[in-house]
């Protein structure tokens, strides 16, 4: 399903509401400006994690916060690492994560339909947070971690011709 809303926050709200109401196994958000390889999507959909993202290069940096490299939590089976936040440009949420986010937030009327206000930050924050920051906070308060597979990378096609490897950058940080 394509959402043509102007706000990234509202796209997440609509996607979570739709996935919950239709009882989907999960939901994947992919920004239309992202270039990616097919195996990125397949691995993301096959993760056993409840919230996972593909690292997205925005033309300057990868849009994620990994925290202290020496303390990275890593899944030895899949190679995925737990991160503090990641771009919502290429993101998967399981039905469990969708359900908890849906249950924990009030509904608002948007365009004549009832939508869960998961990504509305005004009620608890008095400063600006990116969509990634707010979703990471919401996932943490719902009891979920956010994971990325360092073997995959995507990039914003409209902003850069470079296609760096997140995995190679992670190796350099670990040195």
Image (cartoon, grey):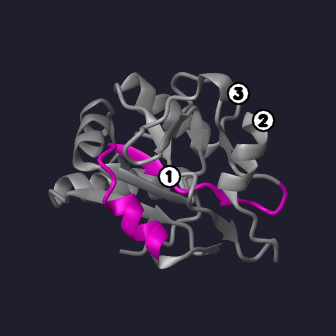
The spot of residue 134 in percent (x, y) is 55, 36
Eyeballing the image, is 62 above or below 35? above
How far from the left and from the top, in percent, is residue 39?
Answer: 45, 72
Image marks 1 and 2: residues in contact by CB distance under 8 Å:
no
Which residue, given by chain and number where applicable, does mark 3 sit on? 127
Mark nearer the N terminus (1 vs 2) = 1
Q: Is 171 left or right of 73, judged from the image as shown?
A: right
Residue at image location 62% in from the left, 62% down from the top? 153
Q: Which mark is residue 175?
A: 2
Secondary structure under tag 2 reads: loop
Q: Which residues are magenta?
A: 39-60
Q: Nearer the viewer, mark 1 or mark 3?
A: 1
Q: Residue at x 51, y 25 (%)?
A: 123
Number of other residues with Cα within 10 Å of mark 3, as a class: few under 14, some 14 to 19, many 20 or more? few
42 inside magenta stretch: yes
Q: Nearer the viewer, mark 2 or mark 3?
A: 2
Asked whether residue 113 is drawn in magenta, I would say no
Identified at 69% across, 49% down, the residue is 63
Rendered view: 22 above or below 79: below
Closer to the N terminus: mark 1 or mark 3?
Answer: 1
Between 9 and 24, the one nearer to me in the picture: 24
Label annotation for residue 159: none
Tell me what residue is drawn at x 50 percent, y 29 percent.
73
* Residue 136 seen anywhere in this rendered image of the structure: yes
User: What secondary structure is found at the residue carrying circle 3?
Assistant: loop
C-alpha gap between disc 1 and disc 2 = 24 Å
Which residue is tagged 1?
A: 53
Residue 87 lies, in percent from the top left, at: 60, 50
Q: CA distance from mark 1 to mark 3?
A: 25 Å
The kind of secondary structure element at disc 1 is strand
């Amino acid at each position: 399903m394509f959402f043509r809303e102007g706000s990234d926050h509202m796209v997440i709200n609509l996607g979570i509401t739709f996935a919950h109401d239709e009882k989907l196994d999960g939901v994947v958000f992919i920004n239309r400006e992202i270039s990616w390889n097919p195996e990125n999507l397949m691995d993301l959909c096959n993760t056993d994690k409840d919230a996972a993202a593909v690292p997205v290069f925005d033309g300057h940096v990868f849009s994620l916060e990994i925290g202290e490299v020496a303390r990275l939590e890593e899944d030895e089976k899949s190679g995925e690492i737990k991160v503090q936040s990641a771009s919502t440009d290429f993101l998967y949420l399981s039905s469990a994560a969708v359900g908890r986010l849906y249950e924990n937030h009030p509904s608002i009327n948007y365009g004549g339909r009832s939508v869960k206000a998961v990504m509305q930050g005004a009620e608890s924050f008095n400063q600006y947070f990116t969509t990634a920051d707010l979703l990471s906070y919401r996932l943490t308060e719902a009891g979920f971690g956010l994971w990325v597979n360092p073997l995959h990378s995507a990039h914003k096609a409209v902003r850069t011709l470079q296609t760096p490897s997140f995995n190679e950058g992670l190796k350099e940080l670990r040195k």
